[in-house]
Image (cartoon, coloured by chain):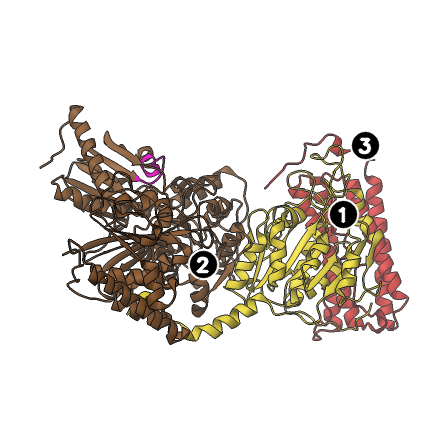
Amino acid sequence: MATRGIDFARLSLKDALDLAIFIEEEAKERYEDFASQMETHHTPDSARFYKFMAGNEEKHRAELAERRGKLFPKDPVTVSRQMLFDVEAPDTDEARTFMTPRQALTVALRCEEKAWAFFDGALKVIKDAGVKELFTELRQEEVEHQDLVKAELAKLPADDRFKTEDFEDEPVSHD
Amino acid sequence: MTTDLVIGMAGSGGDGIVSAGESLIAAVATEGYHAMMTKSFGSQIRGGESSCRVRLSTEPVLNPGGTLDVAIALNWEDFLKFGGELPVGGNTIVIYESKTGVAPDKLPLPGVTPAEVFPVPIADMAKESAKTDKAKNTVILGLIAGWFGIGGDGVMKGLRKKLAKKGPELLEANERALAAGRKYAQDHPLKTPRVMERPKTVSPKLLTDGNDMCGAAAIFSGCQFFGGYPITPSTEIMQFLSREIWKYGGSVLQAEDEIAGIGAAVGASFAGKKAMTATSGPGMSLKTEMLGLATIAELPLVLVNVQRGGPSTGLPTKTEQADLYQAAFSAHGDVLRPVLAPTCVADTFEITVEAFNMAEMYQTPVVILSDQEISQRKETCDPIDTSKFRLVDRLRPANSELGTHYARYRFTESGISPISEPGMPGGNYLAAGIEHNEKGAPISGGIMHAKMNEKRFRKLNPIRTRRDLFQTYGDPNAPLALIAWGSVAGVAREALRVAERKGVKVKLLVPRLLYPIAEEFFNDFLSGVQAGLVVEQSHQGQLYHIMKMVLDLPKGLKSYARSGANPFQPAEIVRRLREQAQAMHQSGDSMPQEE
Amino acid sequence: MTLAMPAPVPTLQAKDFRSDLKPIWCPGCGDFGVVQAVYRALAAVGRPPHEIAFISGIGCSSRIPGYTTAYGFNSVHGRALPIAQGIKIAHPELLVLVAGGDGDGFSIGGGHVAHAVRRNIDLTYIVMDNQIYGLTKGQLSPTSPRGLKTVTSMYGSLEEPLNPLMYVLSYGAPFVAQGTPADLPGLTAMLEEAIRYPGFSFVNIQSPCVTYGEESGQIKAQKEKMKALADMKHDPTDRIKALSLAQDYGRELYTGVFFRDPNPPPTYDALVKARQAELSANALPRQNILDLFLQK
């Protein structure tokens, strides 16, 4: 899990909320990056899916931000995104040229599972009751997201047995 | 009285012949003479044969001169190794070490009867006067002072300065050796006295060589970075700068190779500083890729190529003019790169300042194509009024142009786009060797590439109209023309003098901008020309062929070219010119006027 | 989970270093992670983008300066280091980063590395080492393992790979580290430390090529085999120990700082400034420079 420098035992509710916001923000941006990579590399169906995911993450981020605004309207942010990379966001290397929507959804599913594991792990050390409540709720949301993605996956036809690389053009050399 | 004297001396490195020449030229400079000194060496690093020529005159000296007036041989074997570089003729006074045992009527100079011959016991005189035969070179300076009335006291003054830290003993020994030489000359007068006429006025003079002059001009121009690699005959530029440039907030990087040298200079220029590199032909070959980078990234850069004989290692210590094609054309892709050539040491100052100005003005690499002769010969020159030079800095963006909308390679009417540099807020951009759009972002499309090429060429258009980069001499209506560049220009100017004295109507063009060809200027000069010569020290005659590529040349204009290390003589150029005119006449074309 | 909260909030954010250019890298490329780590390391260091010069040569990874908002220079193959040194010497106040691939740095540009190291110019050299030539479509690189089959080594490479870590350590680099996008927090911290280090710092990043790279080099595989030097209780002030560990390059994947000279030697750029200051009092006015040649 790519986080560093977080002492969950001493995490306050405000910082926990900010962290959660950053986690969503990170995921949103990574999905946007992936969507952009898919667009640049002529993989439009997966691009559309990653854009959809980015939209979801943004929605969650906005909800959390609103709560944070209500609870701690004036308190400054004291945690940073510096050391959060892929709590809920896919790893930077998970996109592939010509990936099928099924493969793209599988990446997203792994992310939801990964996020669930993150909150679950953190809950084991968290002491603050408010933080505990928040993380429990967030962990539950990941379950719902997993179900959502699984449902989407079920709607998709199975990938055929052939690999794109057996049909595609040779890569192009540059520079 | 004599007004022009060419002295040639040769010996082994241990004889200090070149050191004597240095003392002599410094002394005559303070006496108000115009002078020029060239050196030539064998291939040994230390202890080989060495020679020098000092030409001095009451008039400006345009070239090292031809046949020697005075030939001094410490031993004949070494002297003869320099062959055509030290030609002896019927007017030459020959002075040689009598210990060589050669009889005055049996000199090893077949077919030549010199005007006067003096076997002199130079080594013995040194031993007797200075208590060391090492002082032979000072005895020679005494002989020169005695016979020709030059140097003498000025030499002592110079030695006093040079040896100040070495104690009185050495100085006194030199003093006695000089006196001994003088006395010998007084006791053995020339049959025909050749005492030099004194200059009419004695004004202070600069004395230096082309490489040091180039370095000084770089500092004057505001150069703050030099990156380079040692290579003969350009290294002295780096040496000069490594002594001086720090004082002006600049620095010299002696890089690990030629490529890194120019690379660091490209980097310094990107960082906003005026930057320079210097090399010779082989190094230029290695630097070519970086030049292309500077062209497409539109970075100002001055590159000096001090030409030597090539290809490959060729003749590292001898002059040649065979790198013009390389300077102008060594590039892949469509590249237009200005090439400037100085004609003498003094001109090296002006051309170097011009190169920096041009590089900054047009954000382009500029090549200074010097040659071994100019770069390593010492010349006196009149002080240069530096206040007449305007220094150009690259066009930087106005505050309003900076920010997210800043476009480093913006298409402008002139083709010149304001250039930012790291440290400038809002000027951030990507410089690249890859083709890019106005913002500097890499592209791979043909339309933008064509537009950028057009911009990079268009911005250089004004250079072609620079008439001040050309010198013309002689009768502008003459039907005979001479064209010469670089160090050969000095020989051509003297050839023009000779021709005029003989009543041959001729004009001379000395282009200092060699590329791009300034078509309009060349066409003006060549209109009415029926015959002529483009004189170049290369096998191919490269300027001639570039001219032929771009211009419609008069039928009678021919190339007169030969490989390096074979200096042209004014007289032979005139002879060739007359033959050229003759051929024109015989072929039925209208005859050039000859009075 | 070591440091206590709250962590300092940098005034500059990673997004301030990210440009609008879309990477040409293949989806799945290790360099996507590297550039993320670079954004964050730069944000942590806190120098504004216009005070940063980011220089590269040619290759996939050499495209990286364009993806940042710093002043970038995507130059020619193998020559990033000379250009960067010229920049740093000419303008020592800049933060200078150099990046490129293993071929750019250790094949065509290999001759420059030793000299940048021995000069100890204060810059950070990042090599994205993927053991392959990607942009020219999968040829042998100087760090390709012996036996590797590529389009130019159809029957297997006959050469030993070059060892970038040993190379720079041997020439006396005062800061040498290895990271991977498989550990982005570690990589970010390491880059920040390298950039802050006053002297020549070198970071070798095992950044896999998704298109031509070996399966064993991909991020998933790296996650299985990487070992943090800190966990191995390596003392990064011990150069000999660092050299000894560096010998395992190609077999083991150690991450972290191999060597950090605790007494940073003087940097070339600092010495240049000192020399300029010392000699400037002796300068003739620029316009009188020719007085040097005046014969009196």
Tell me what residue is drawn at x 87 percent, y 58 percent: A117
Q: Answer left or right for A27 relative to B289.
A: right
In the picture, one chain is brown; tell me its letter.
B
Q: Secondary structure at mark 2?
A: helix
Label 2 lies in what chain? B
Contact (Cβ within 8 Å) of mark 1 with mark 3: no
User: What colour denotes chain A?
Assistant: red
Q: Mark 1 to mark 3: distance in Å?
A: 21 Å
Residue bounds of the magenta highlight: B536-545
Question: In the rendering, which numbered label is found on residue B238?
Answer: 2
Chain letter of disc 3 in the image: A
C127 is higher (above) or lower (below) than B544: below
Residue type of the residue flagged with mark 1? Glu
Q: Nearer the viewer, mark 1 or mark 3?
A: 1
Q: In the depicted view, which residue is nearer to us: B163 or A108?
A: B163
Does the rendering let one see residue B414?
no
For the residue pair B193 and A112, the one nearer the viewer reads as B193
**Which numbered circle lies on residue A94?**
1
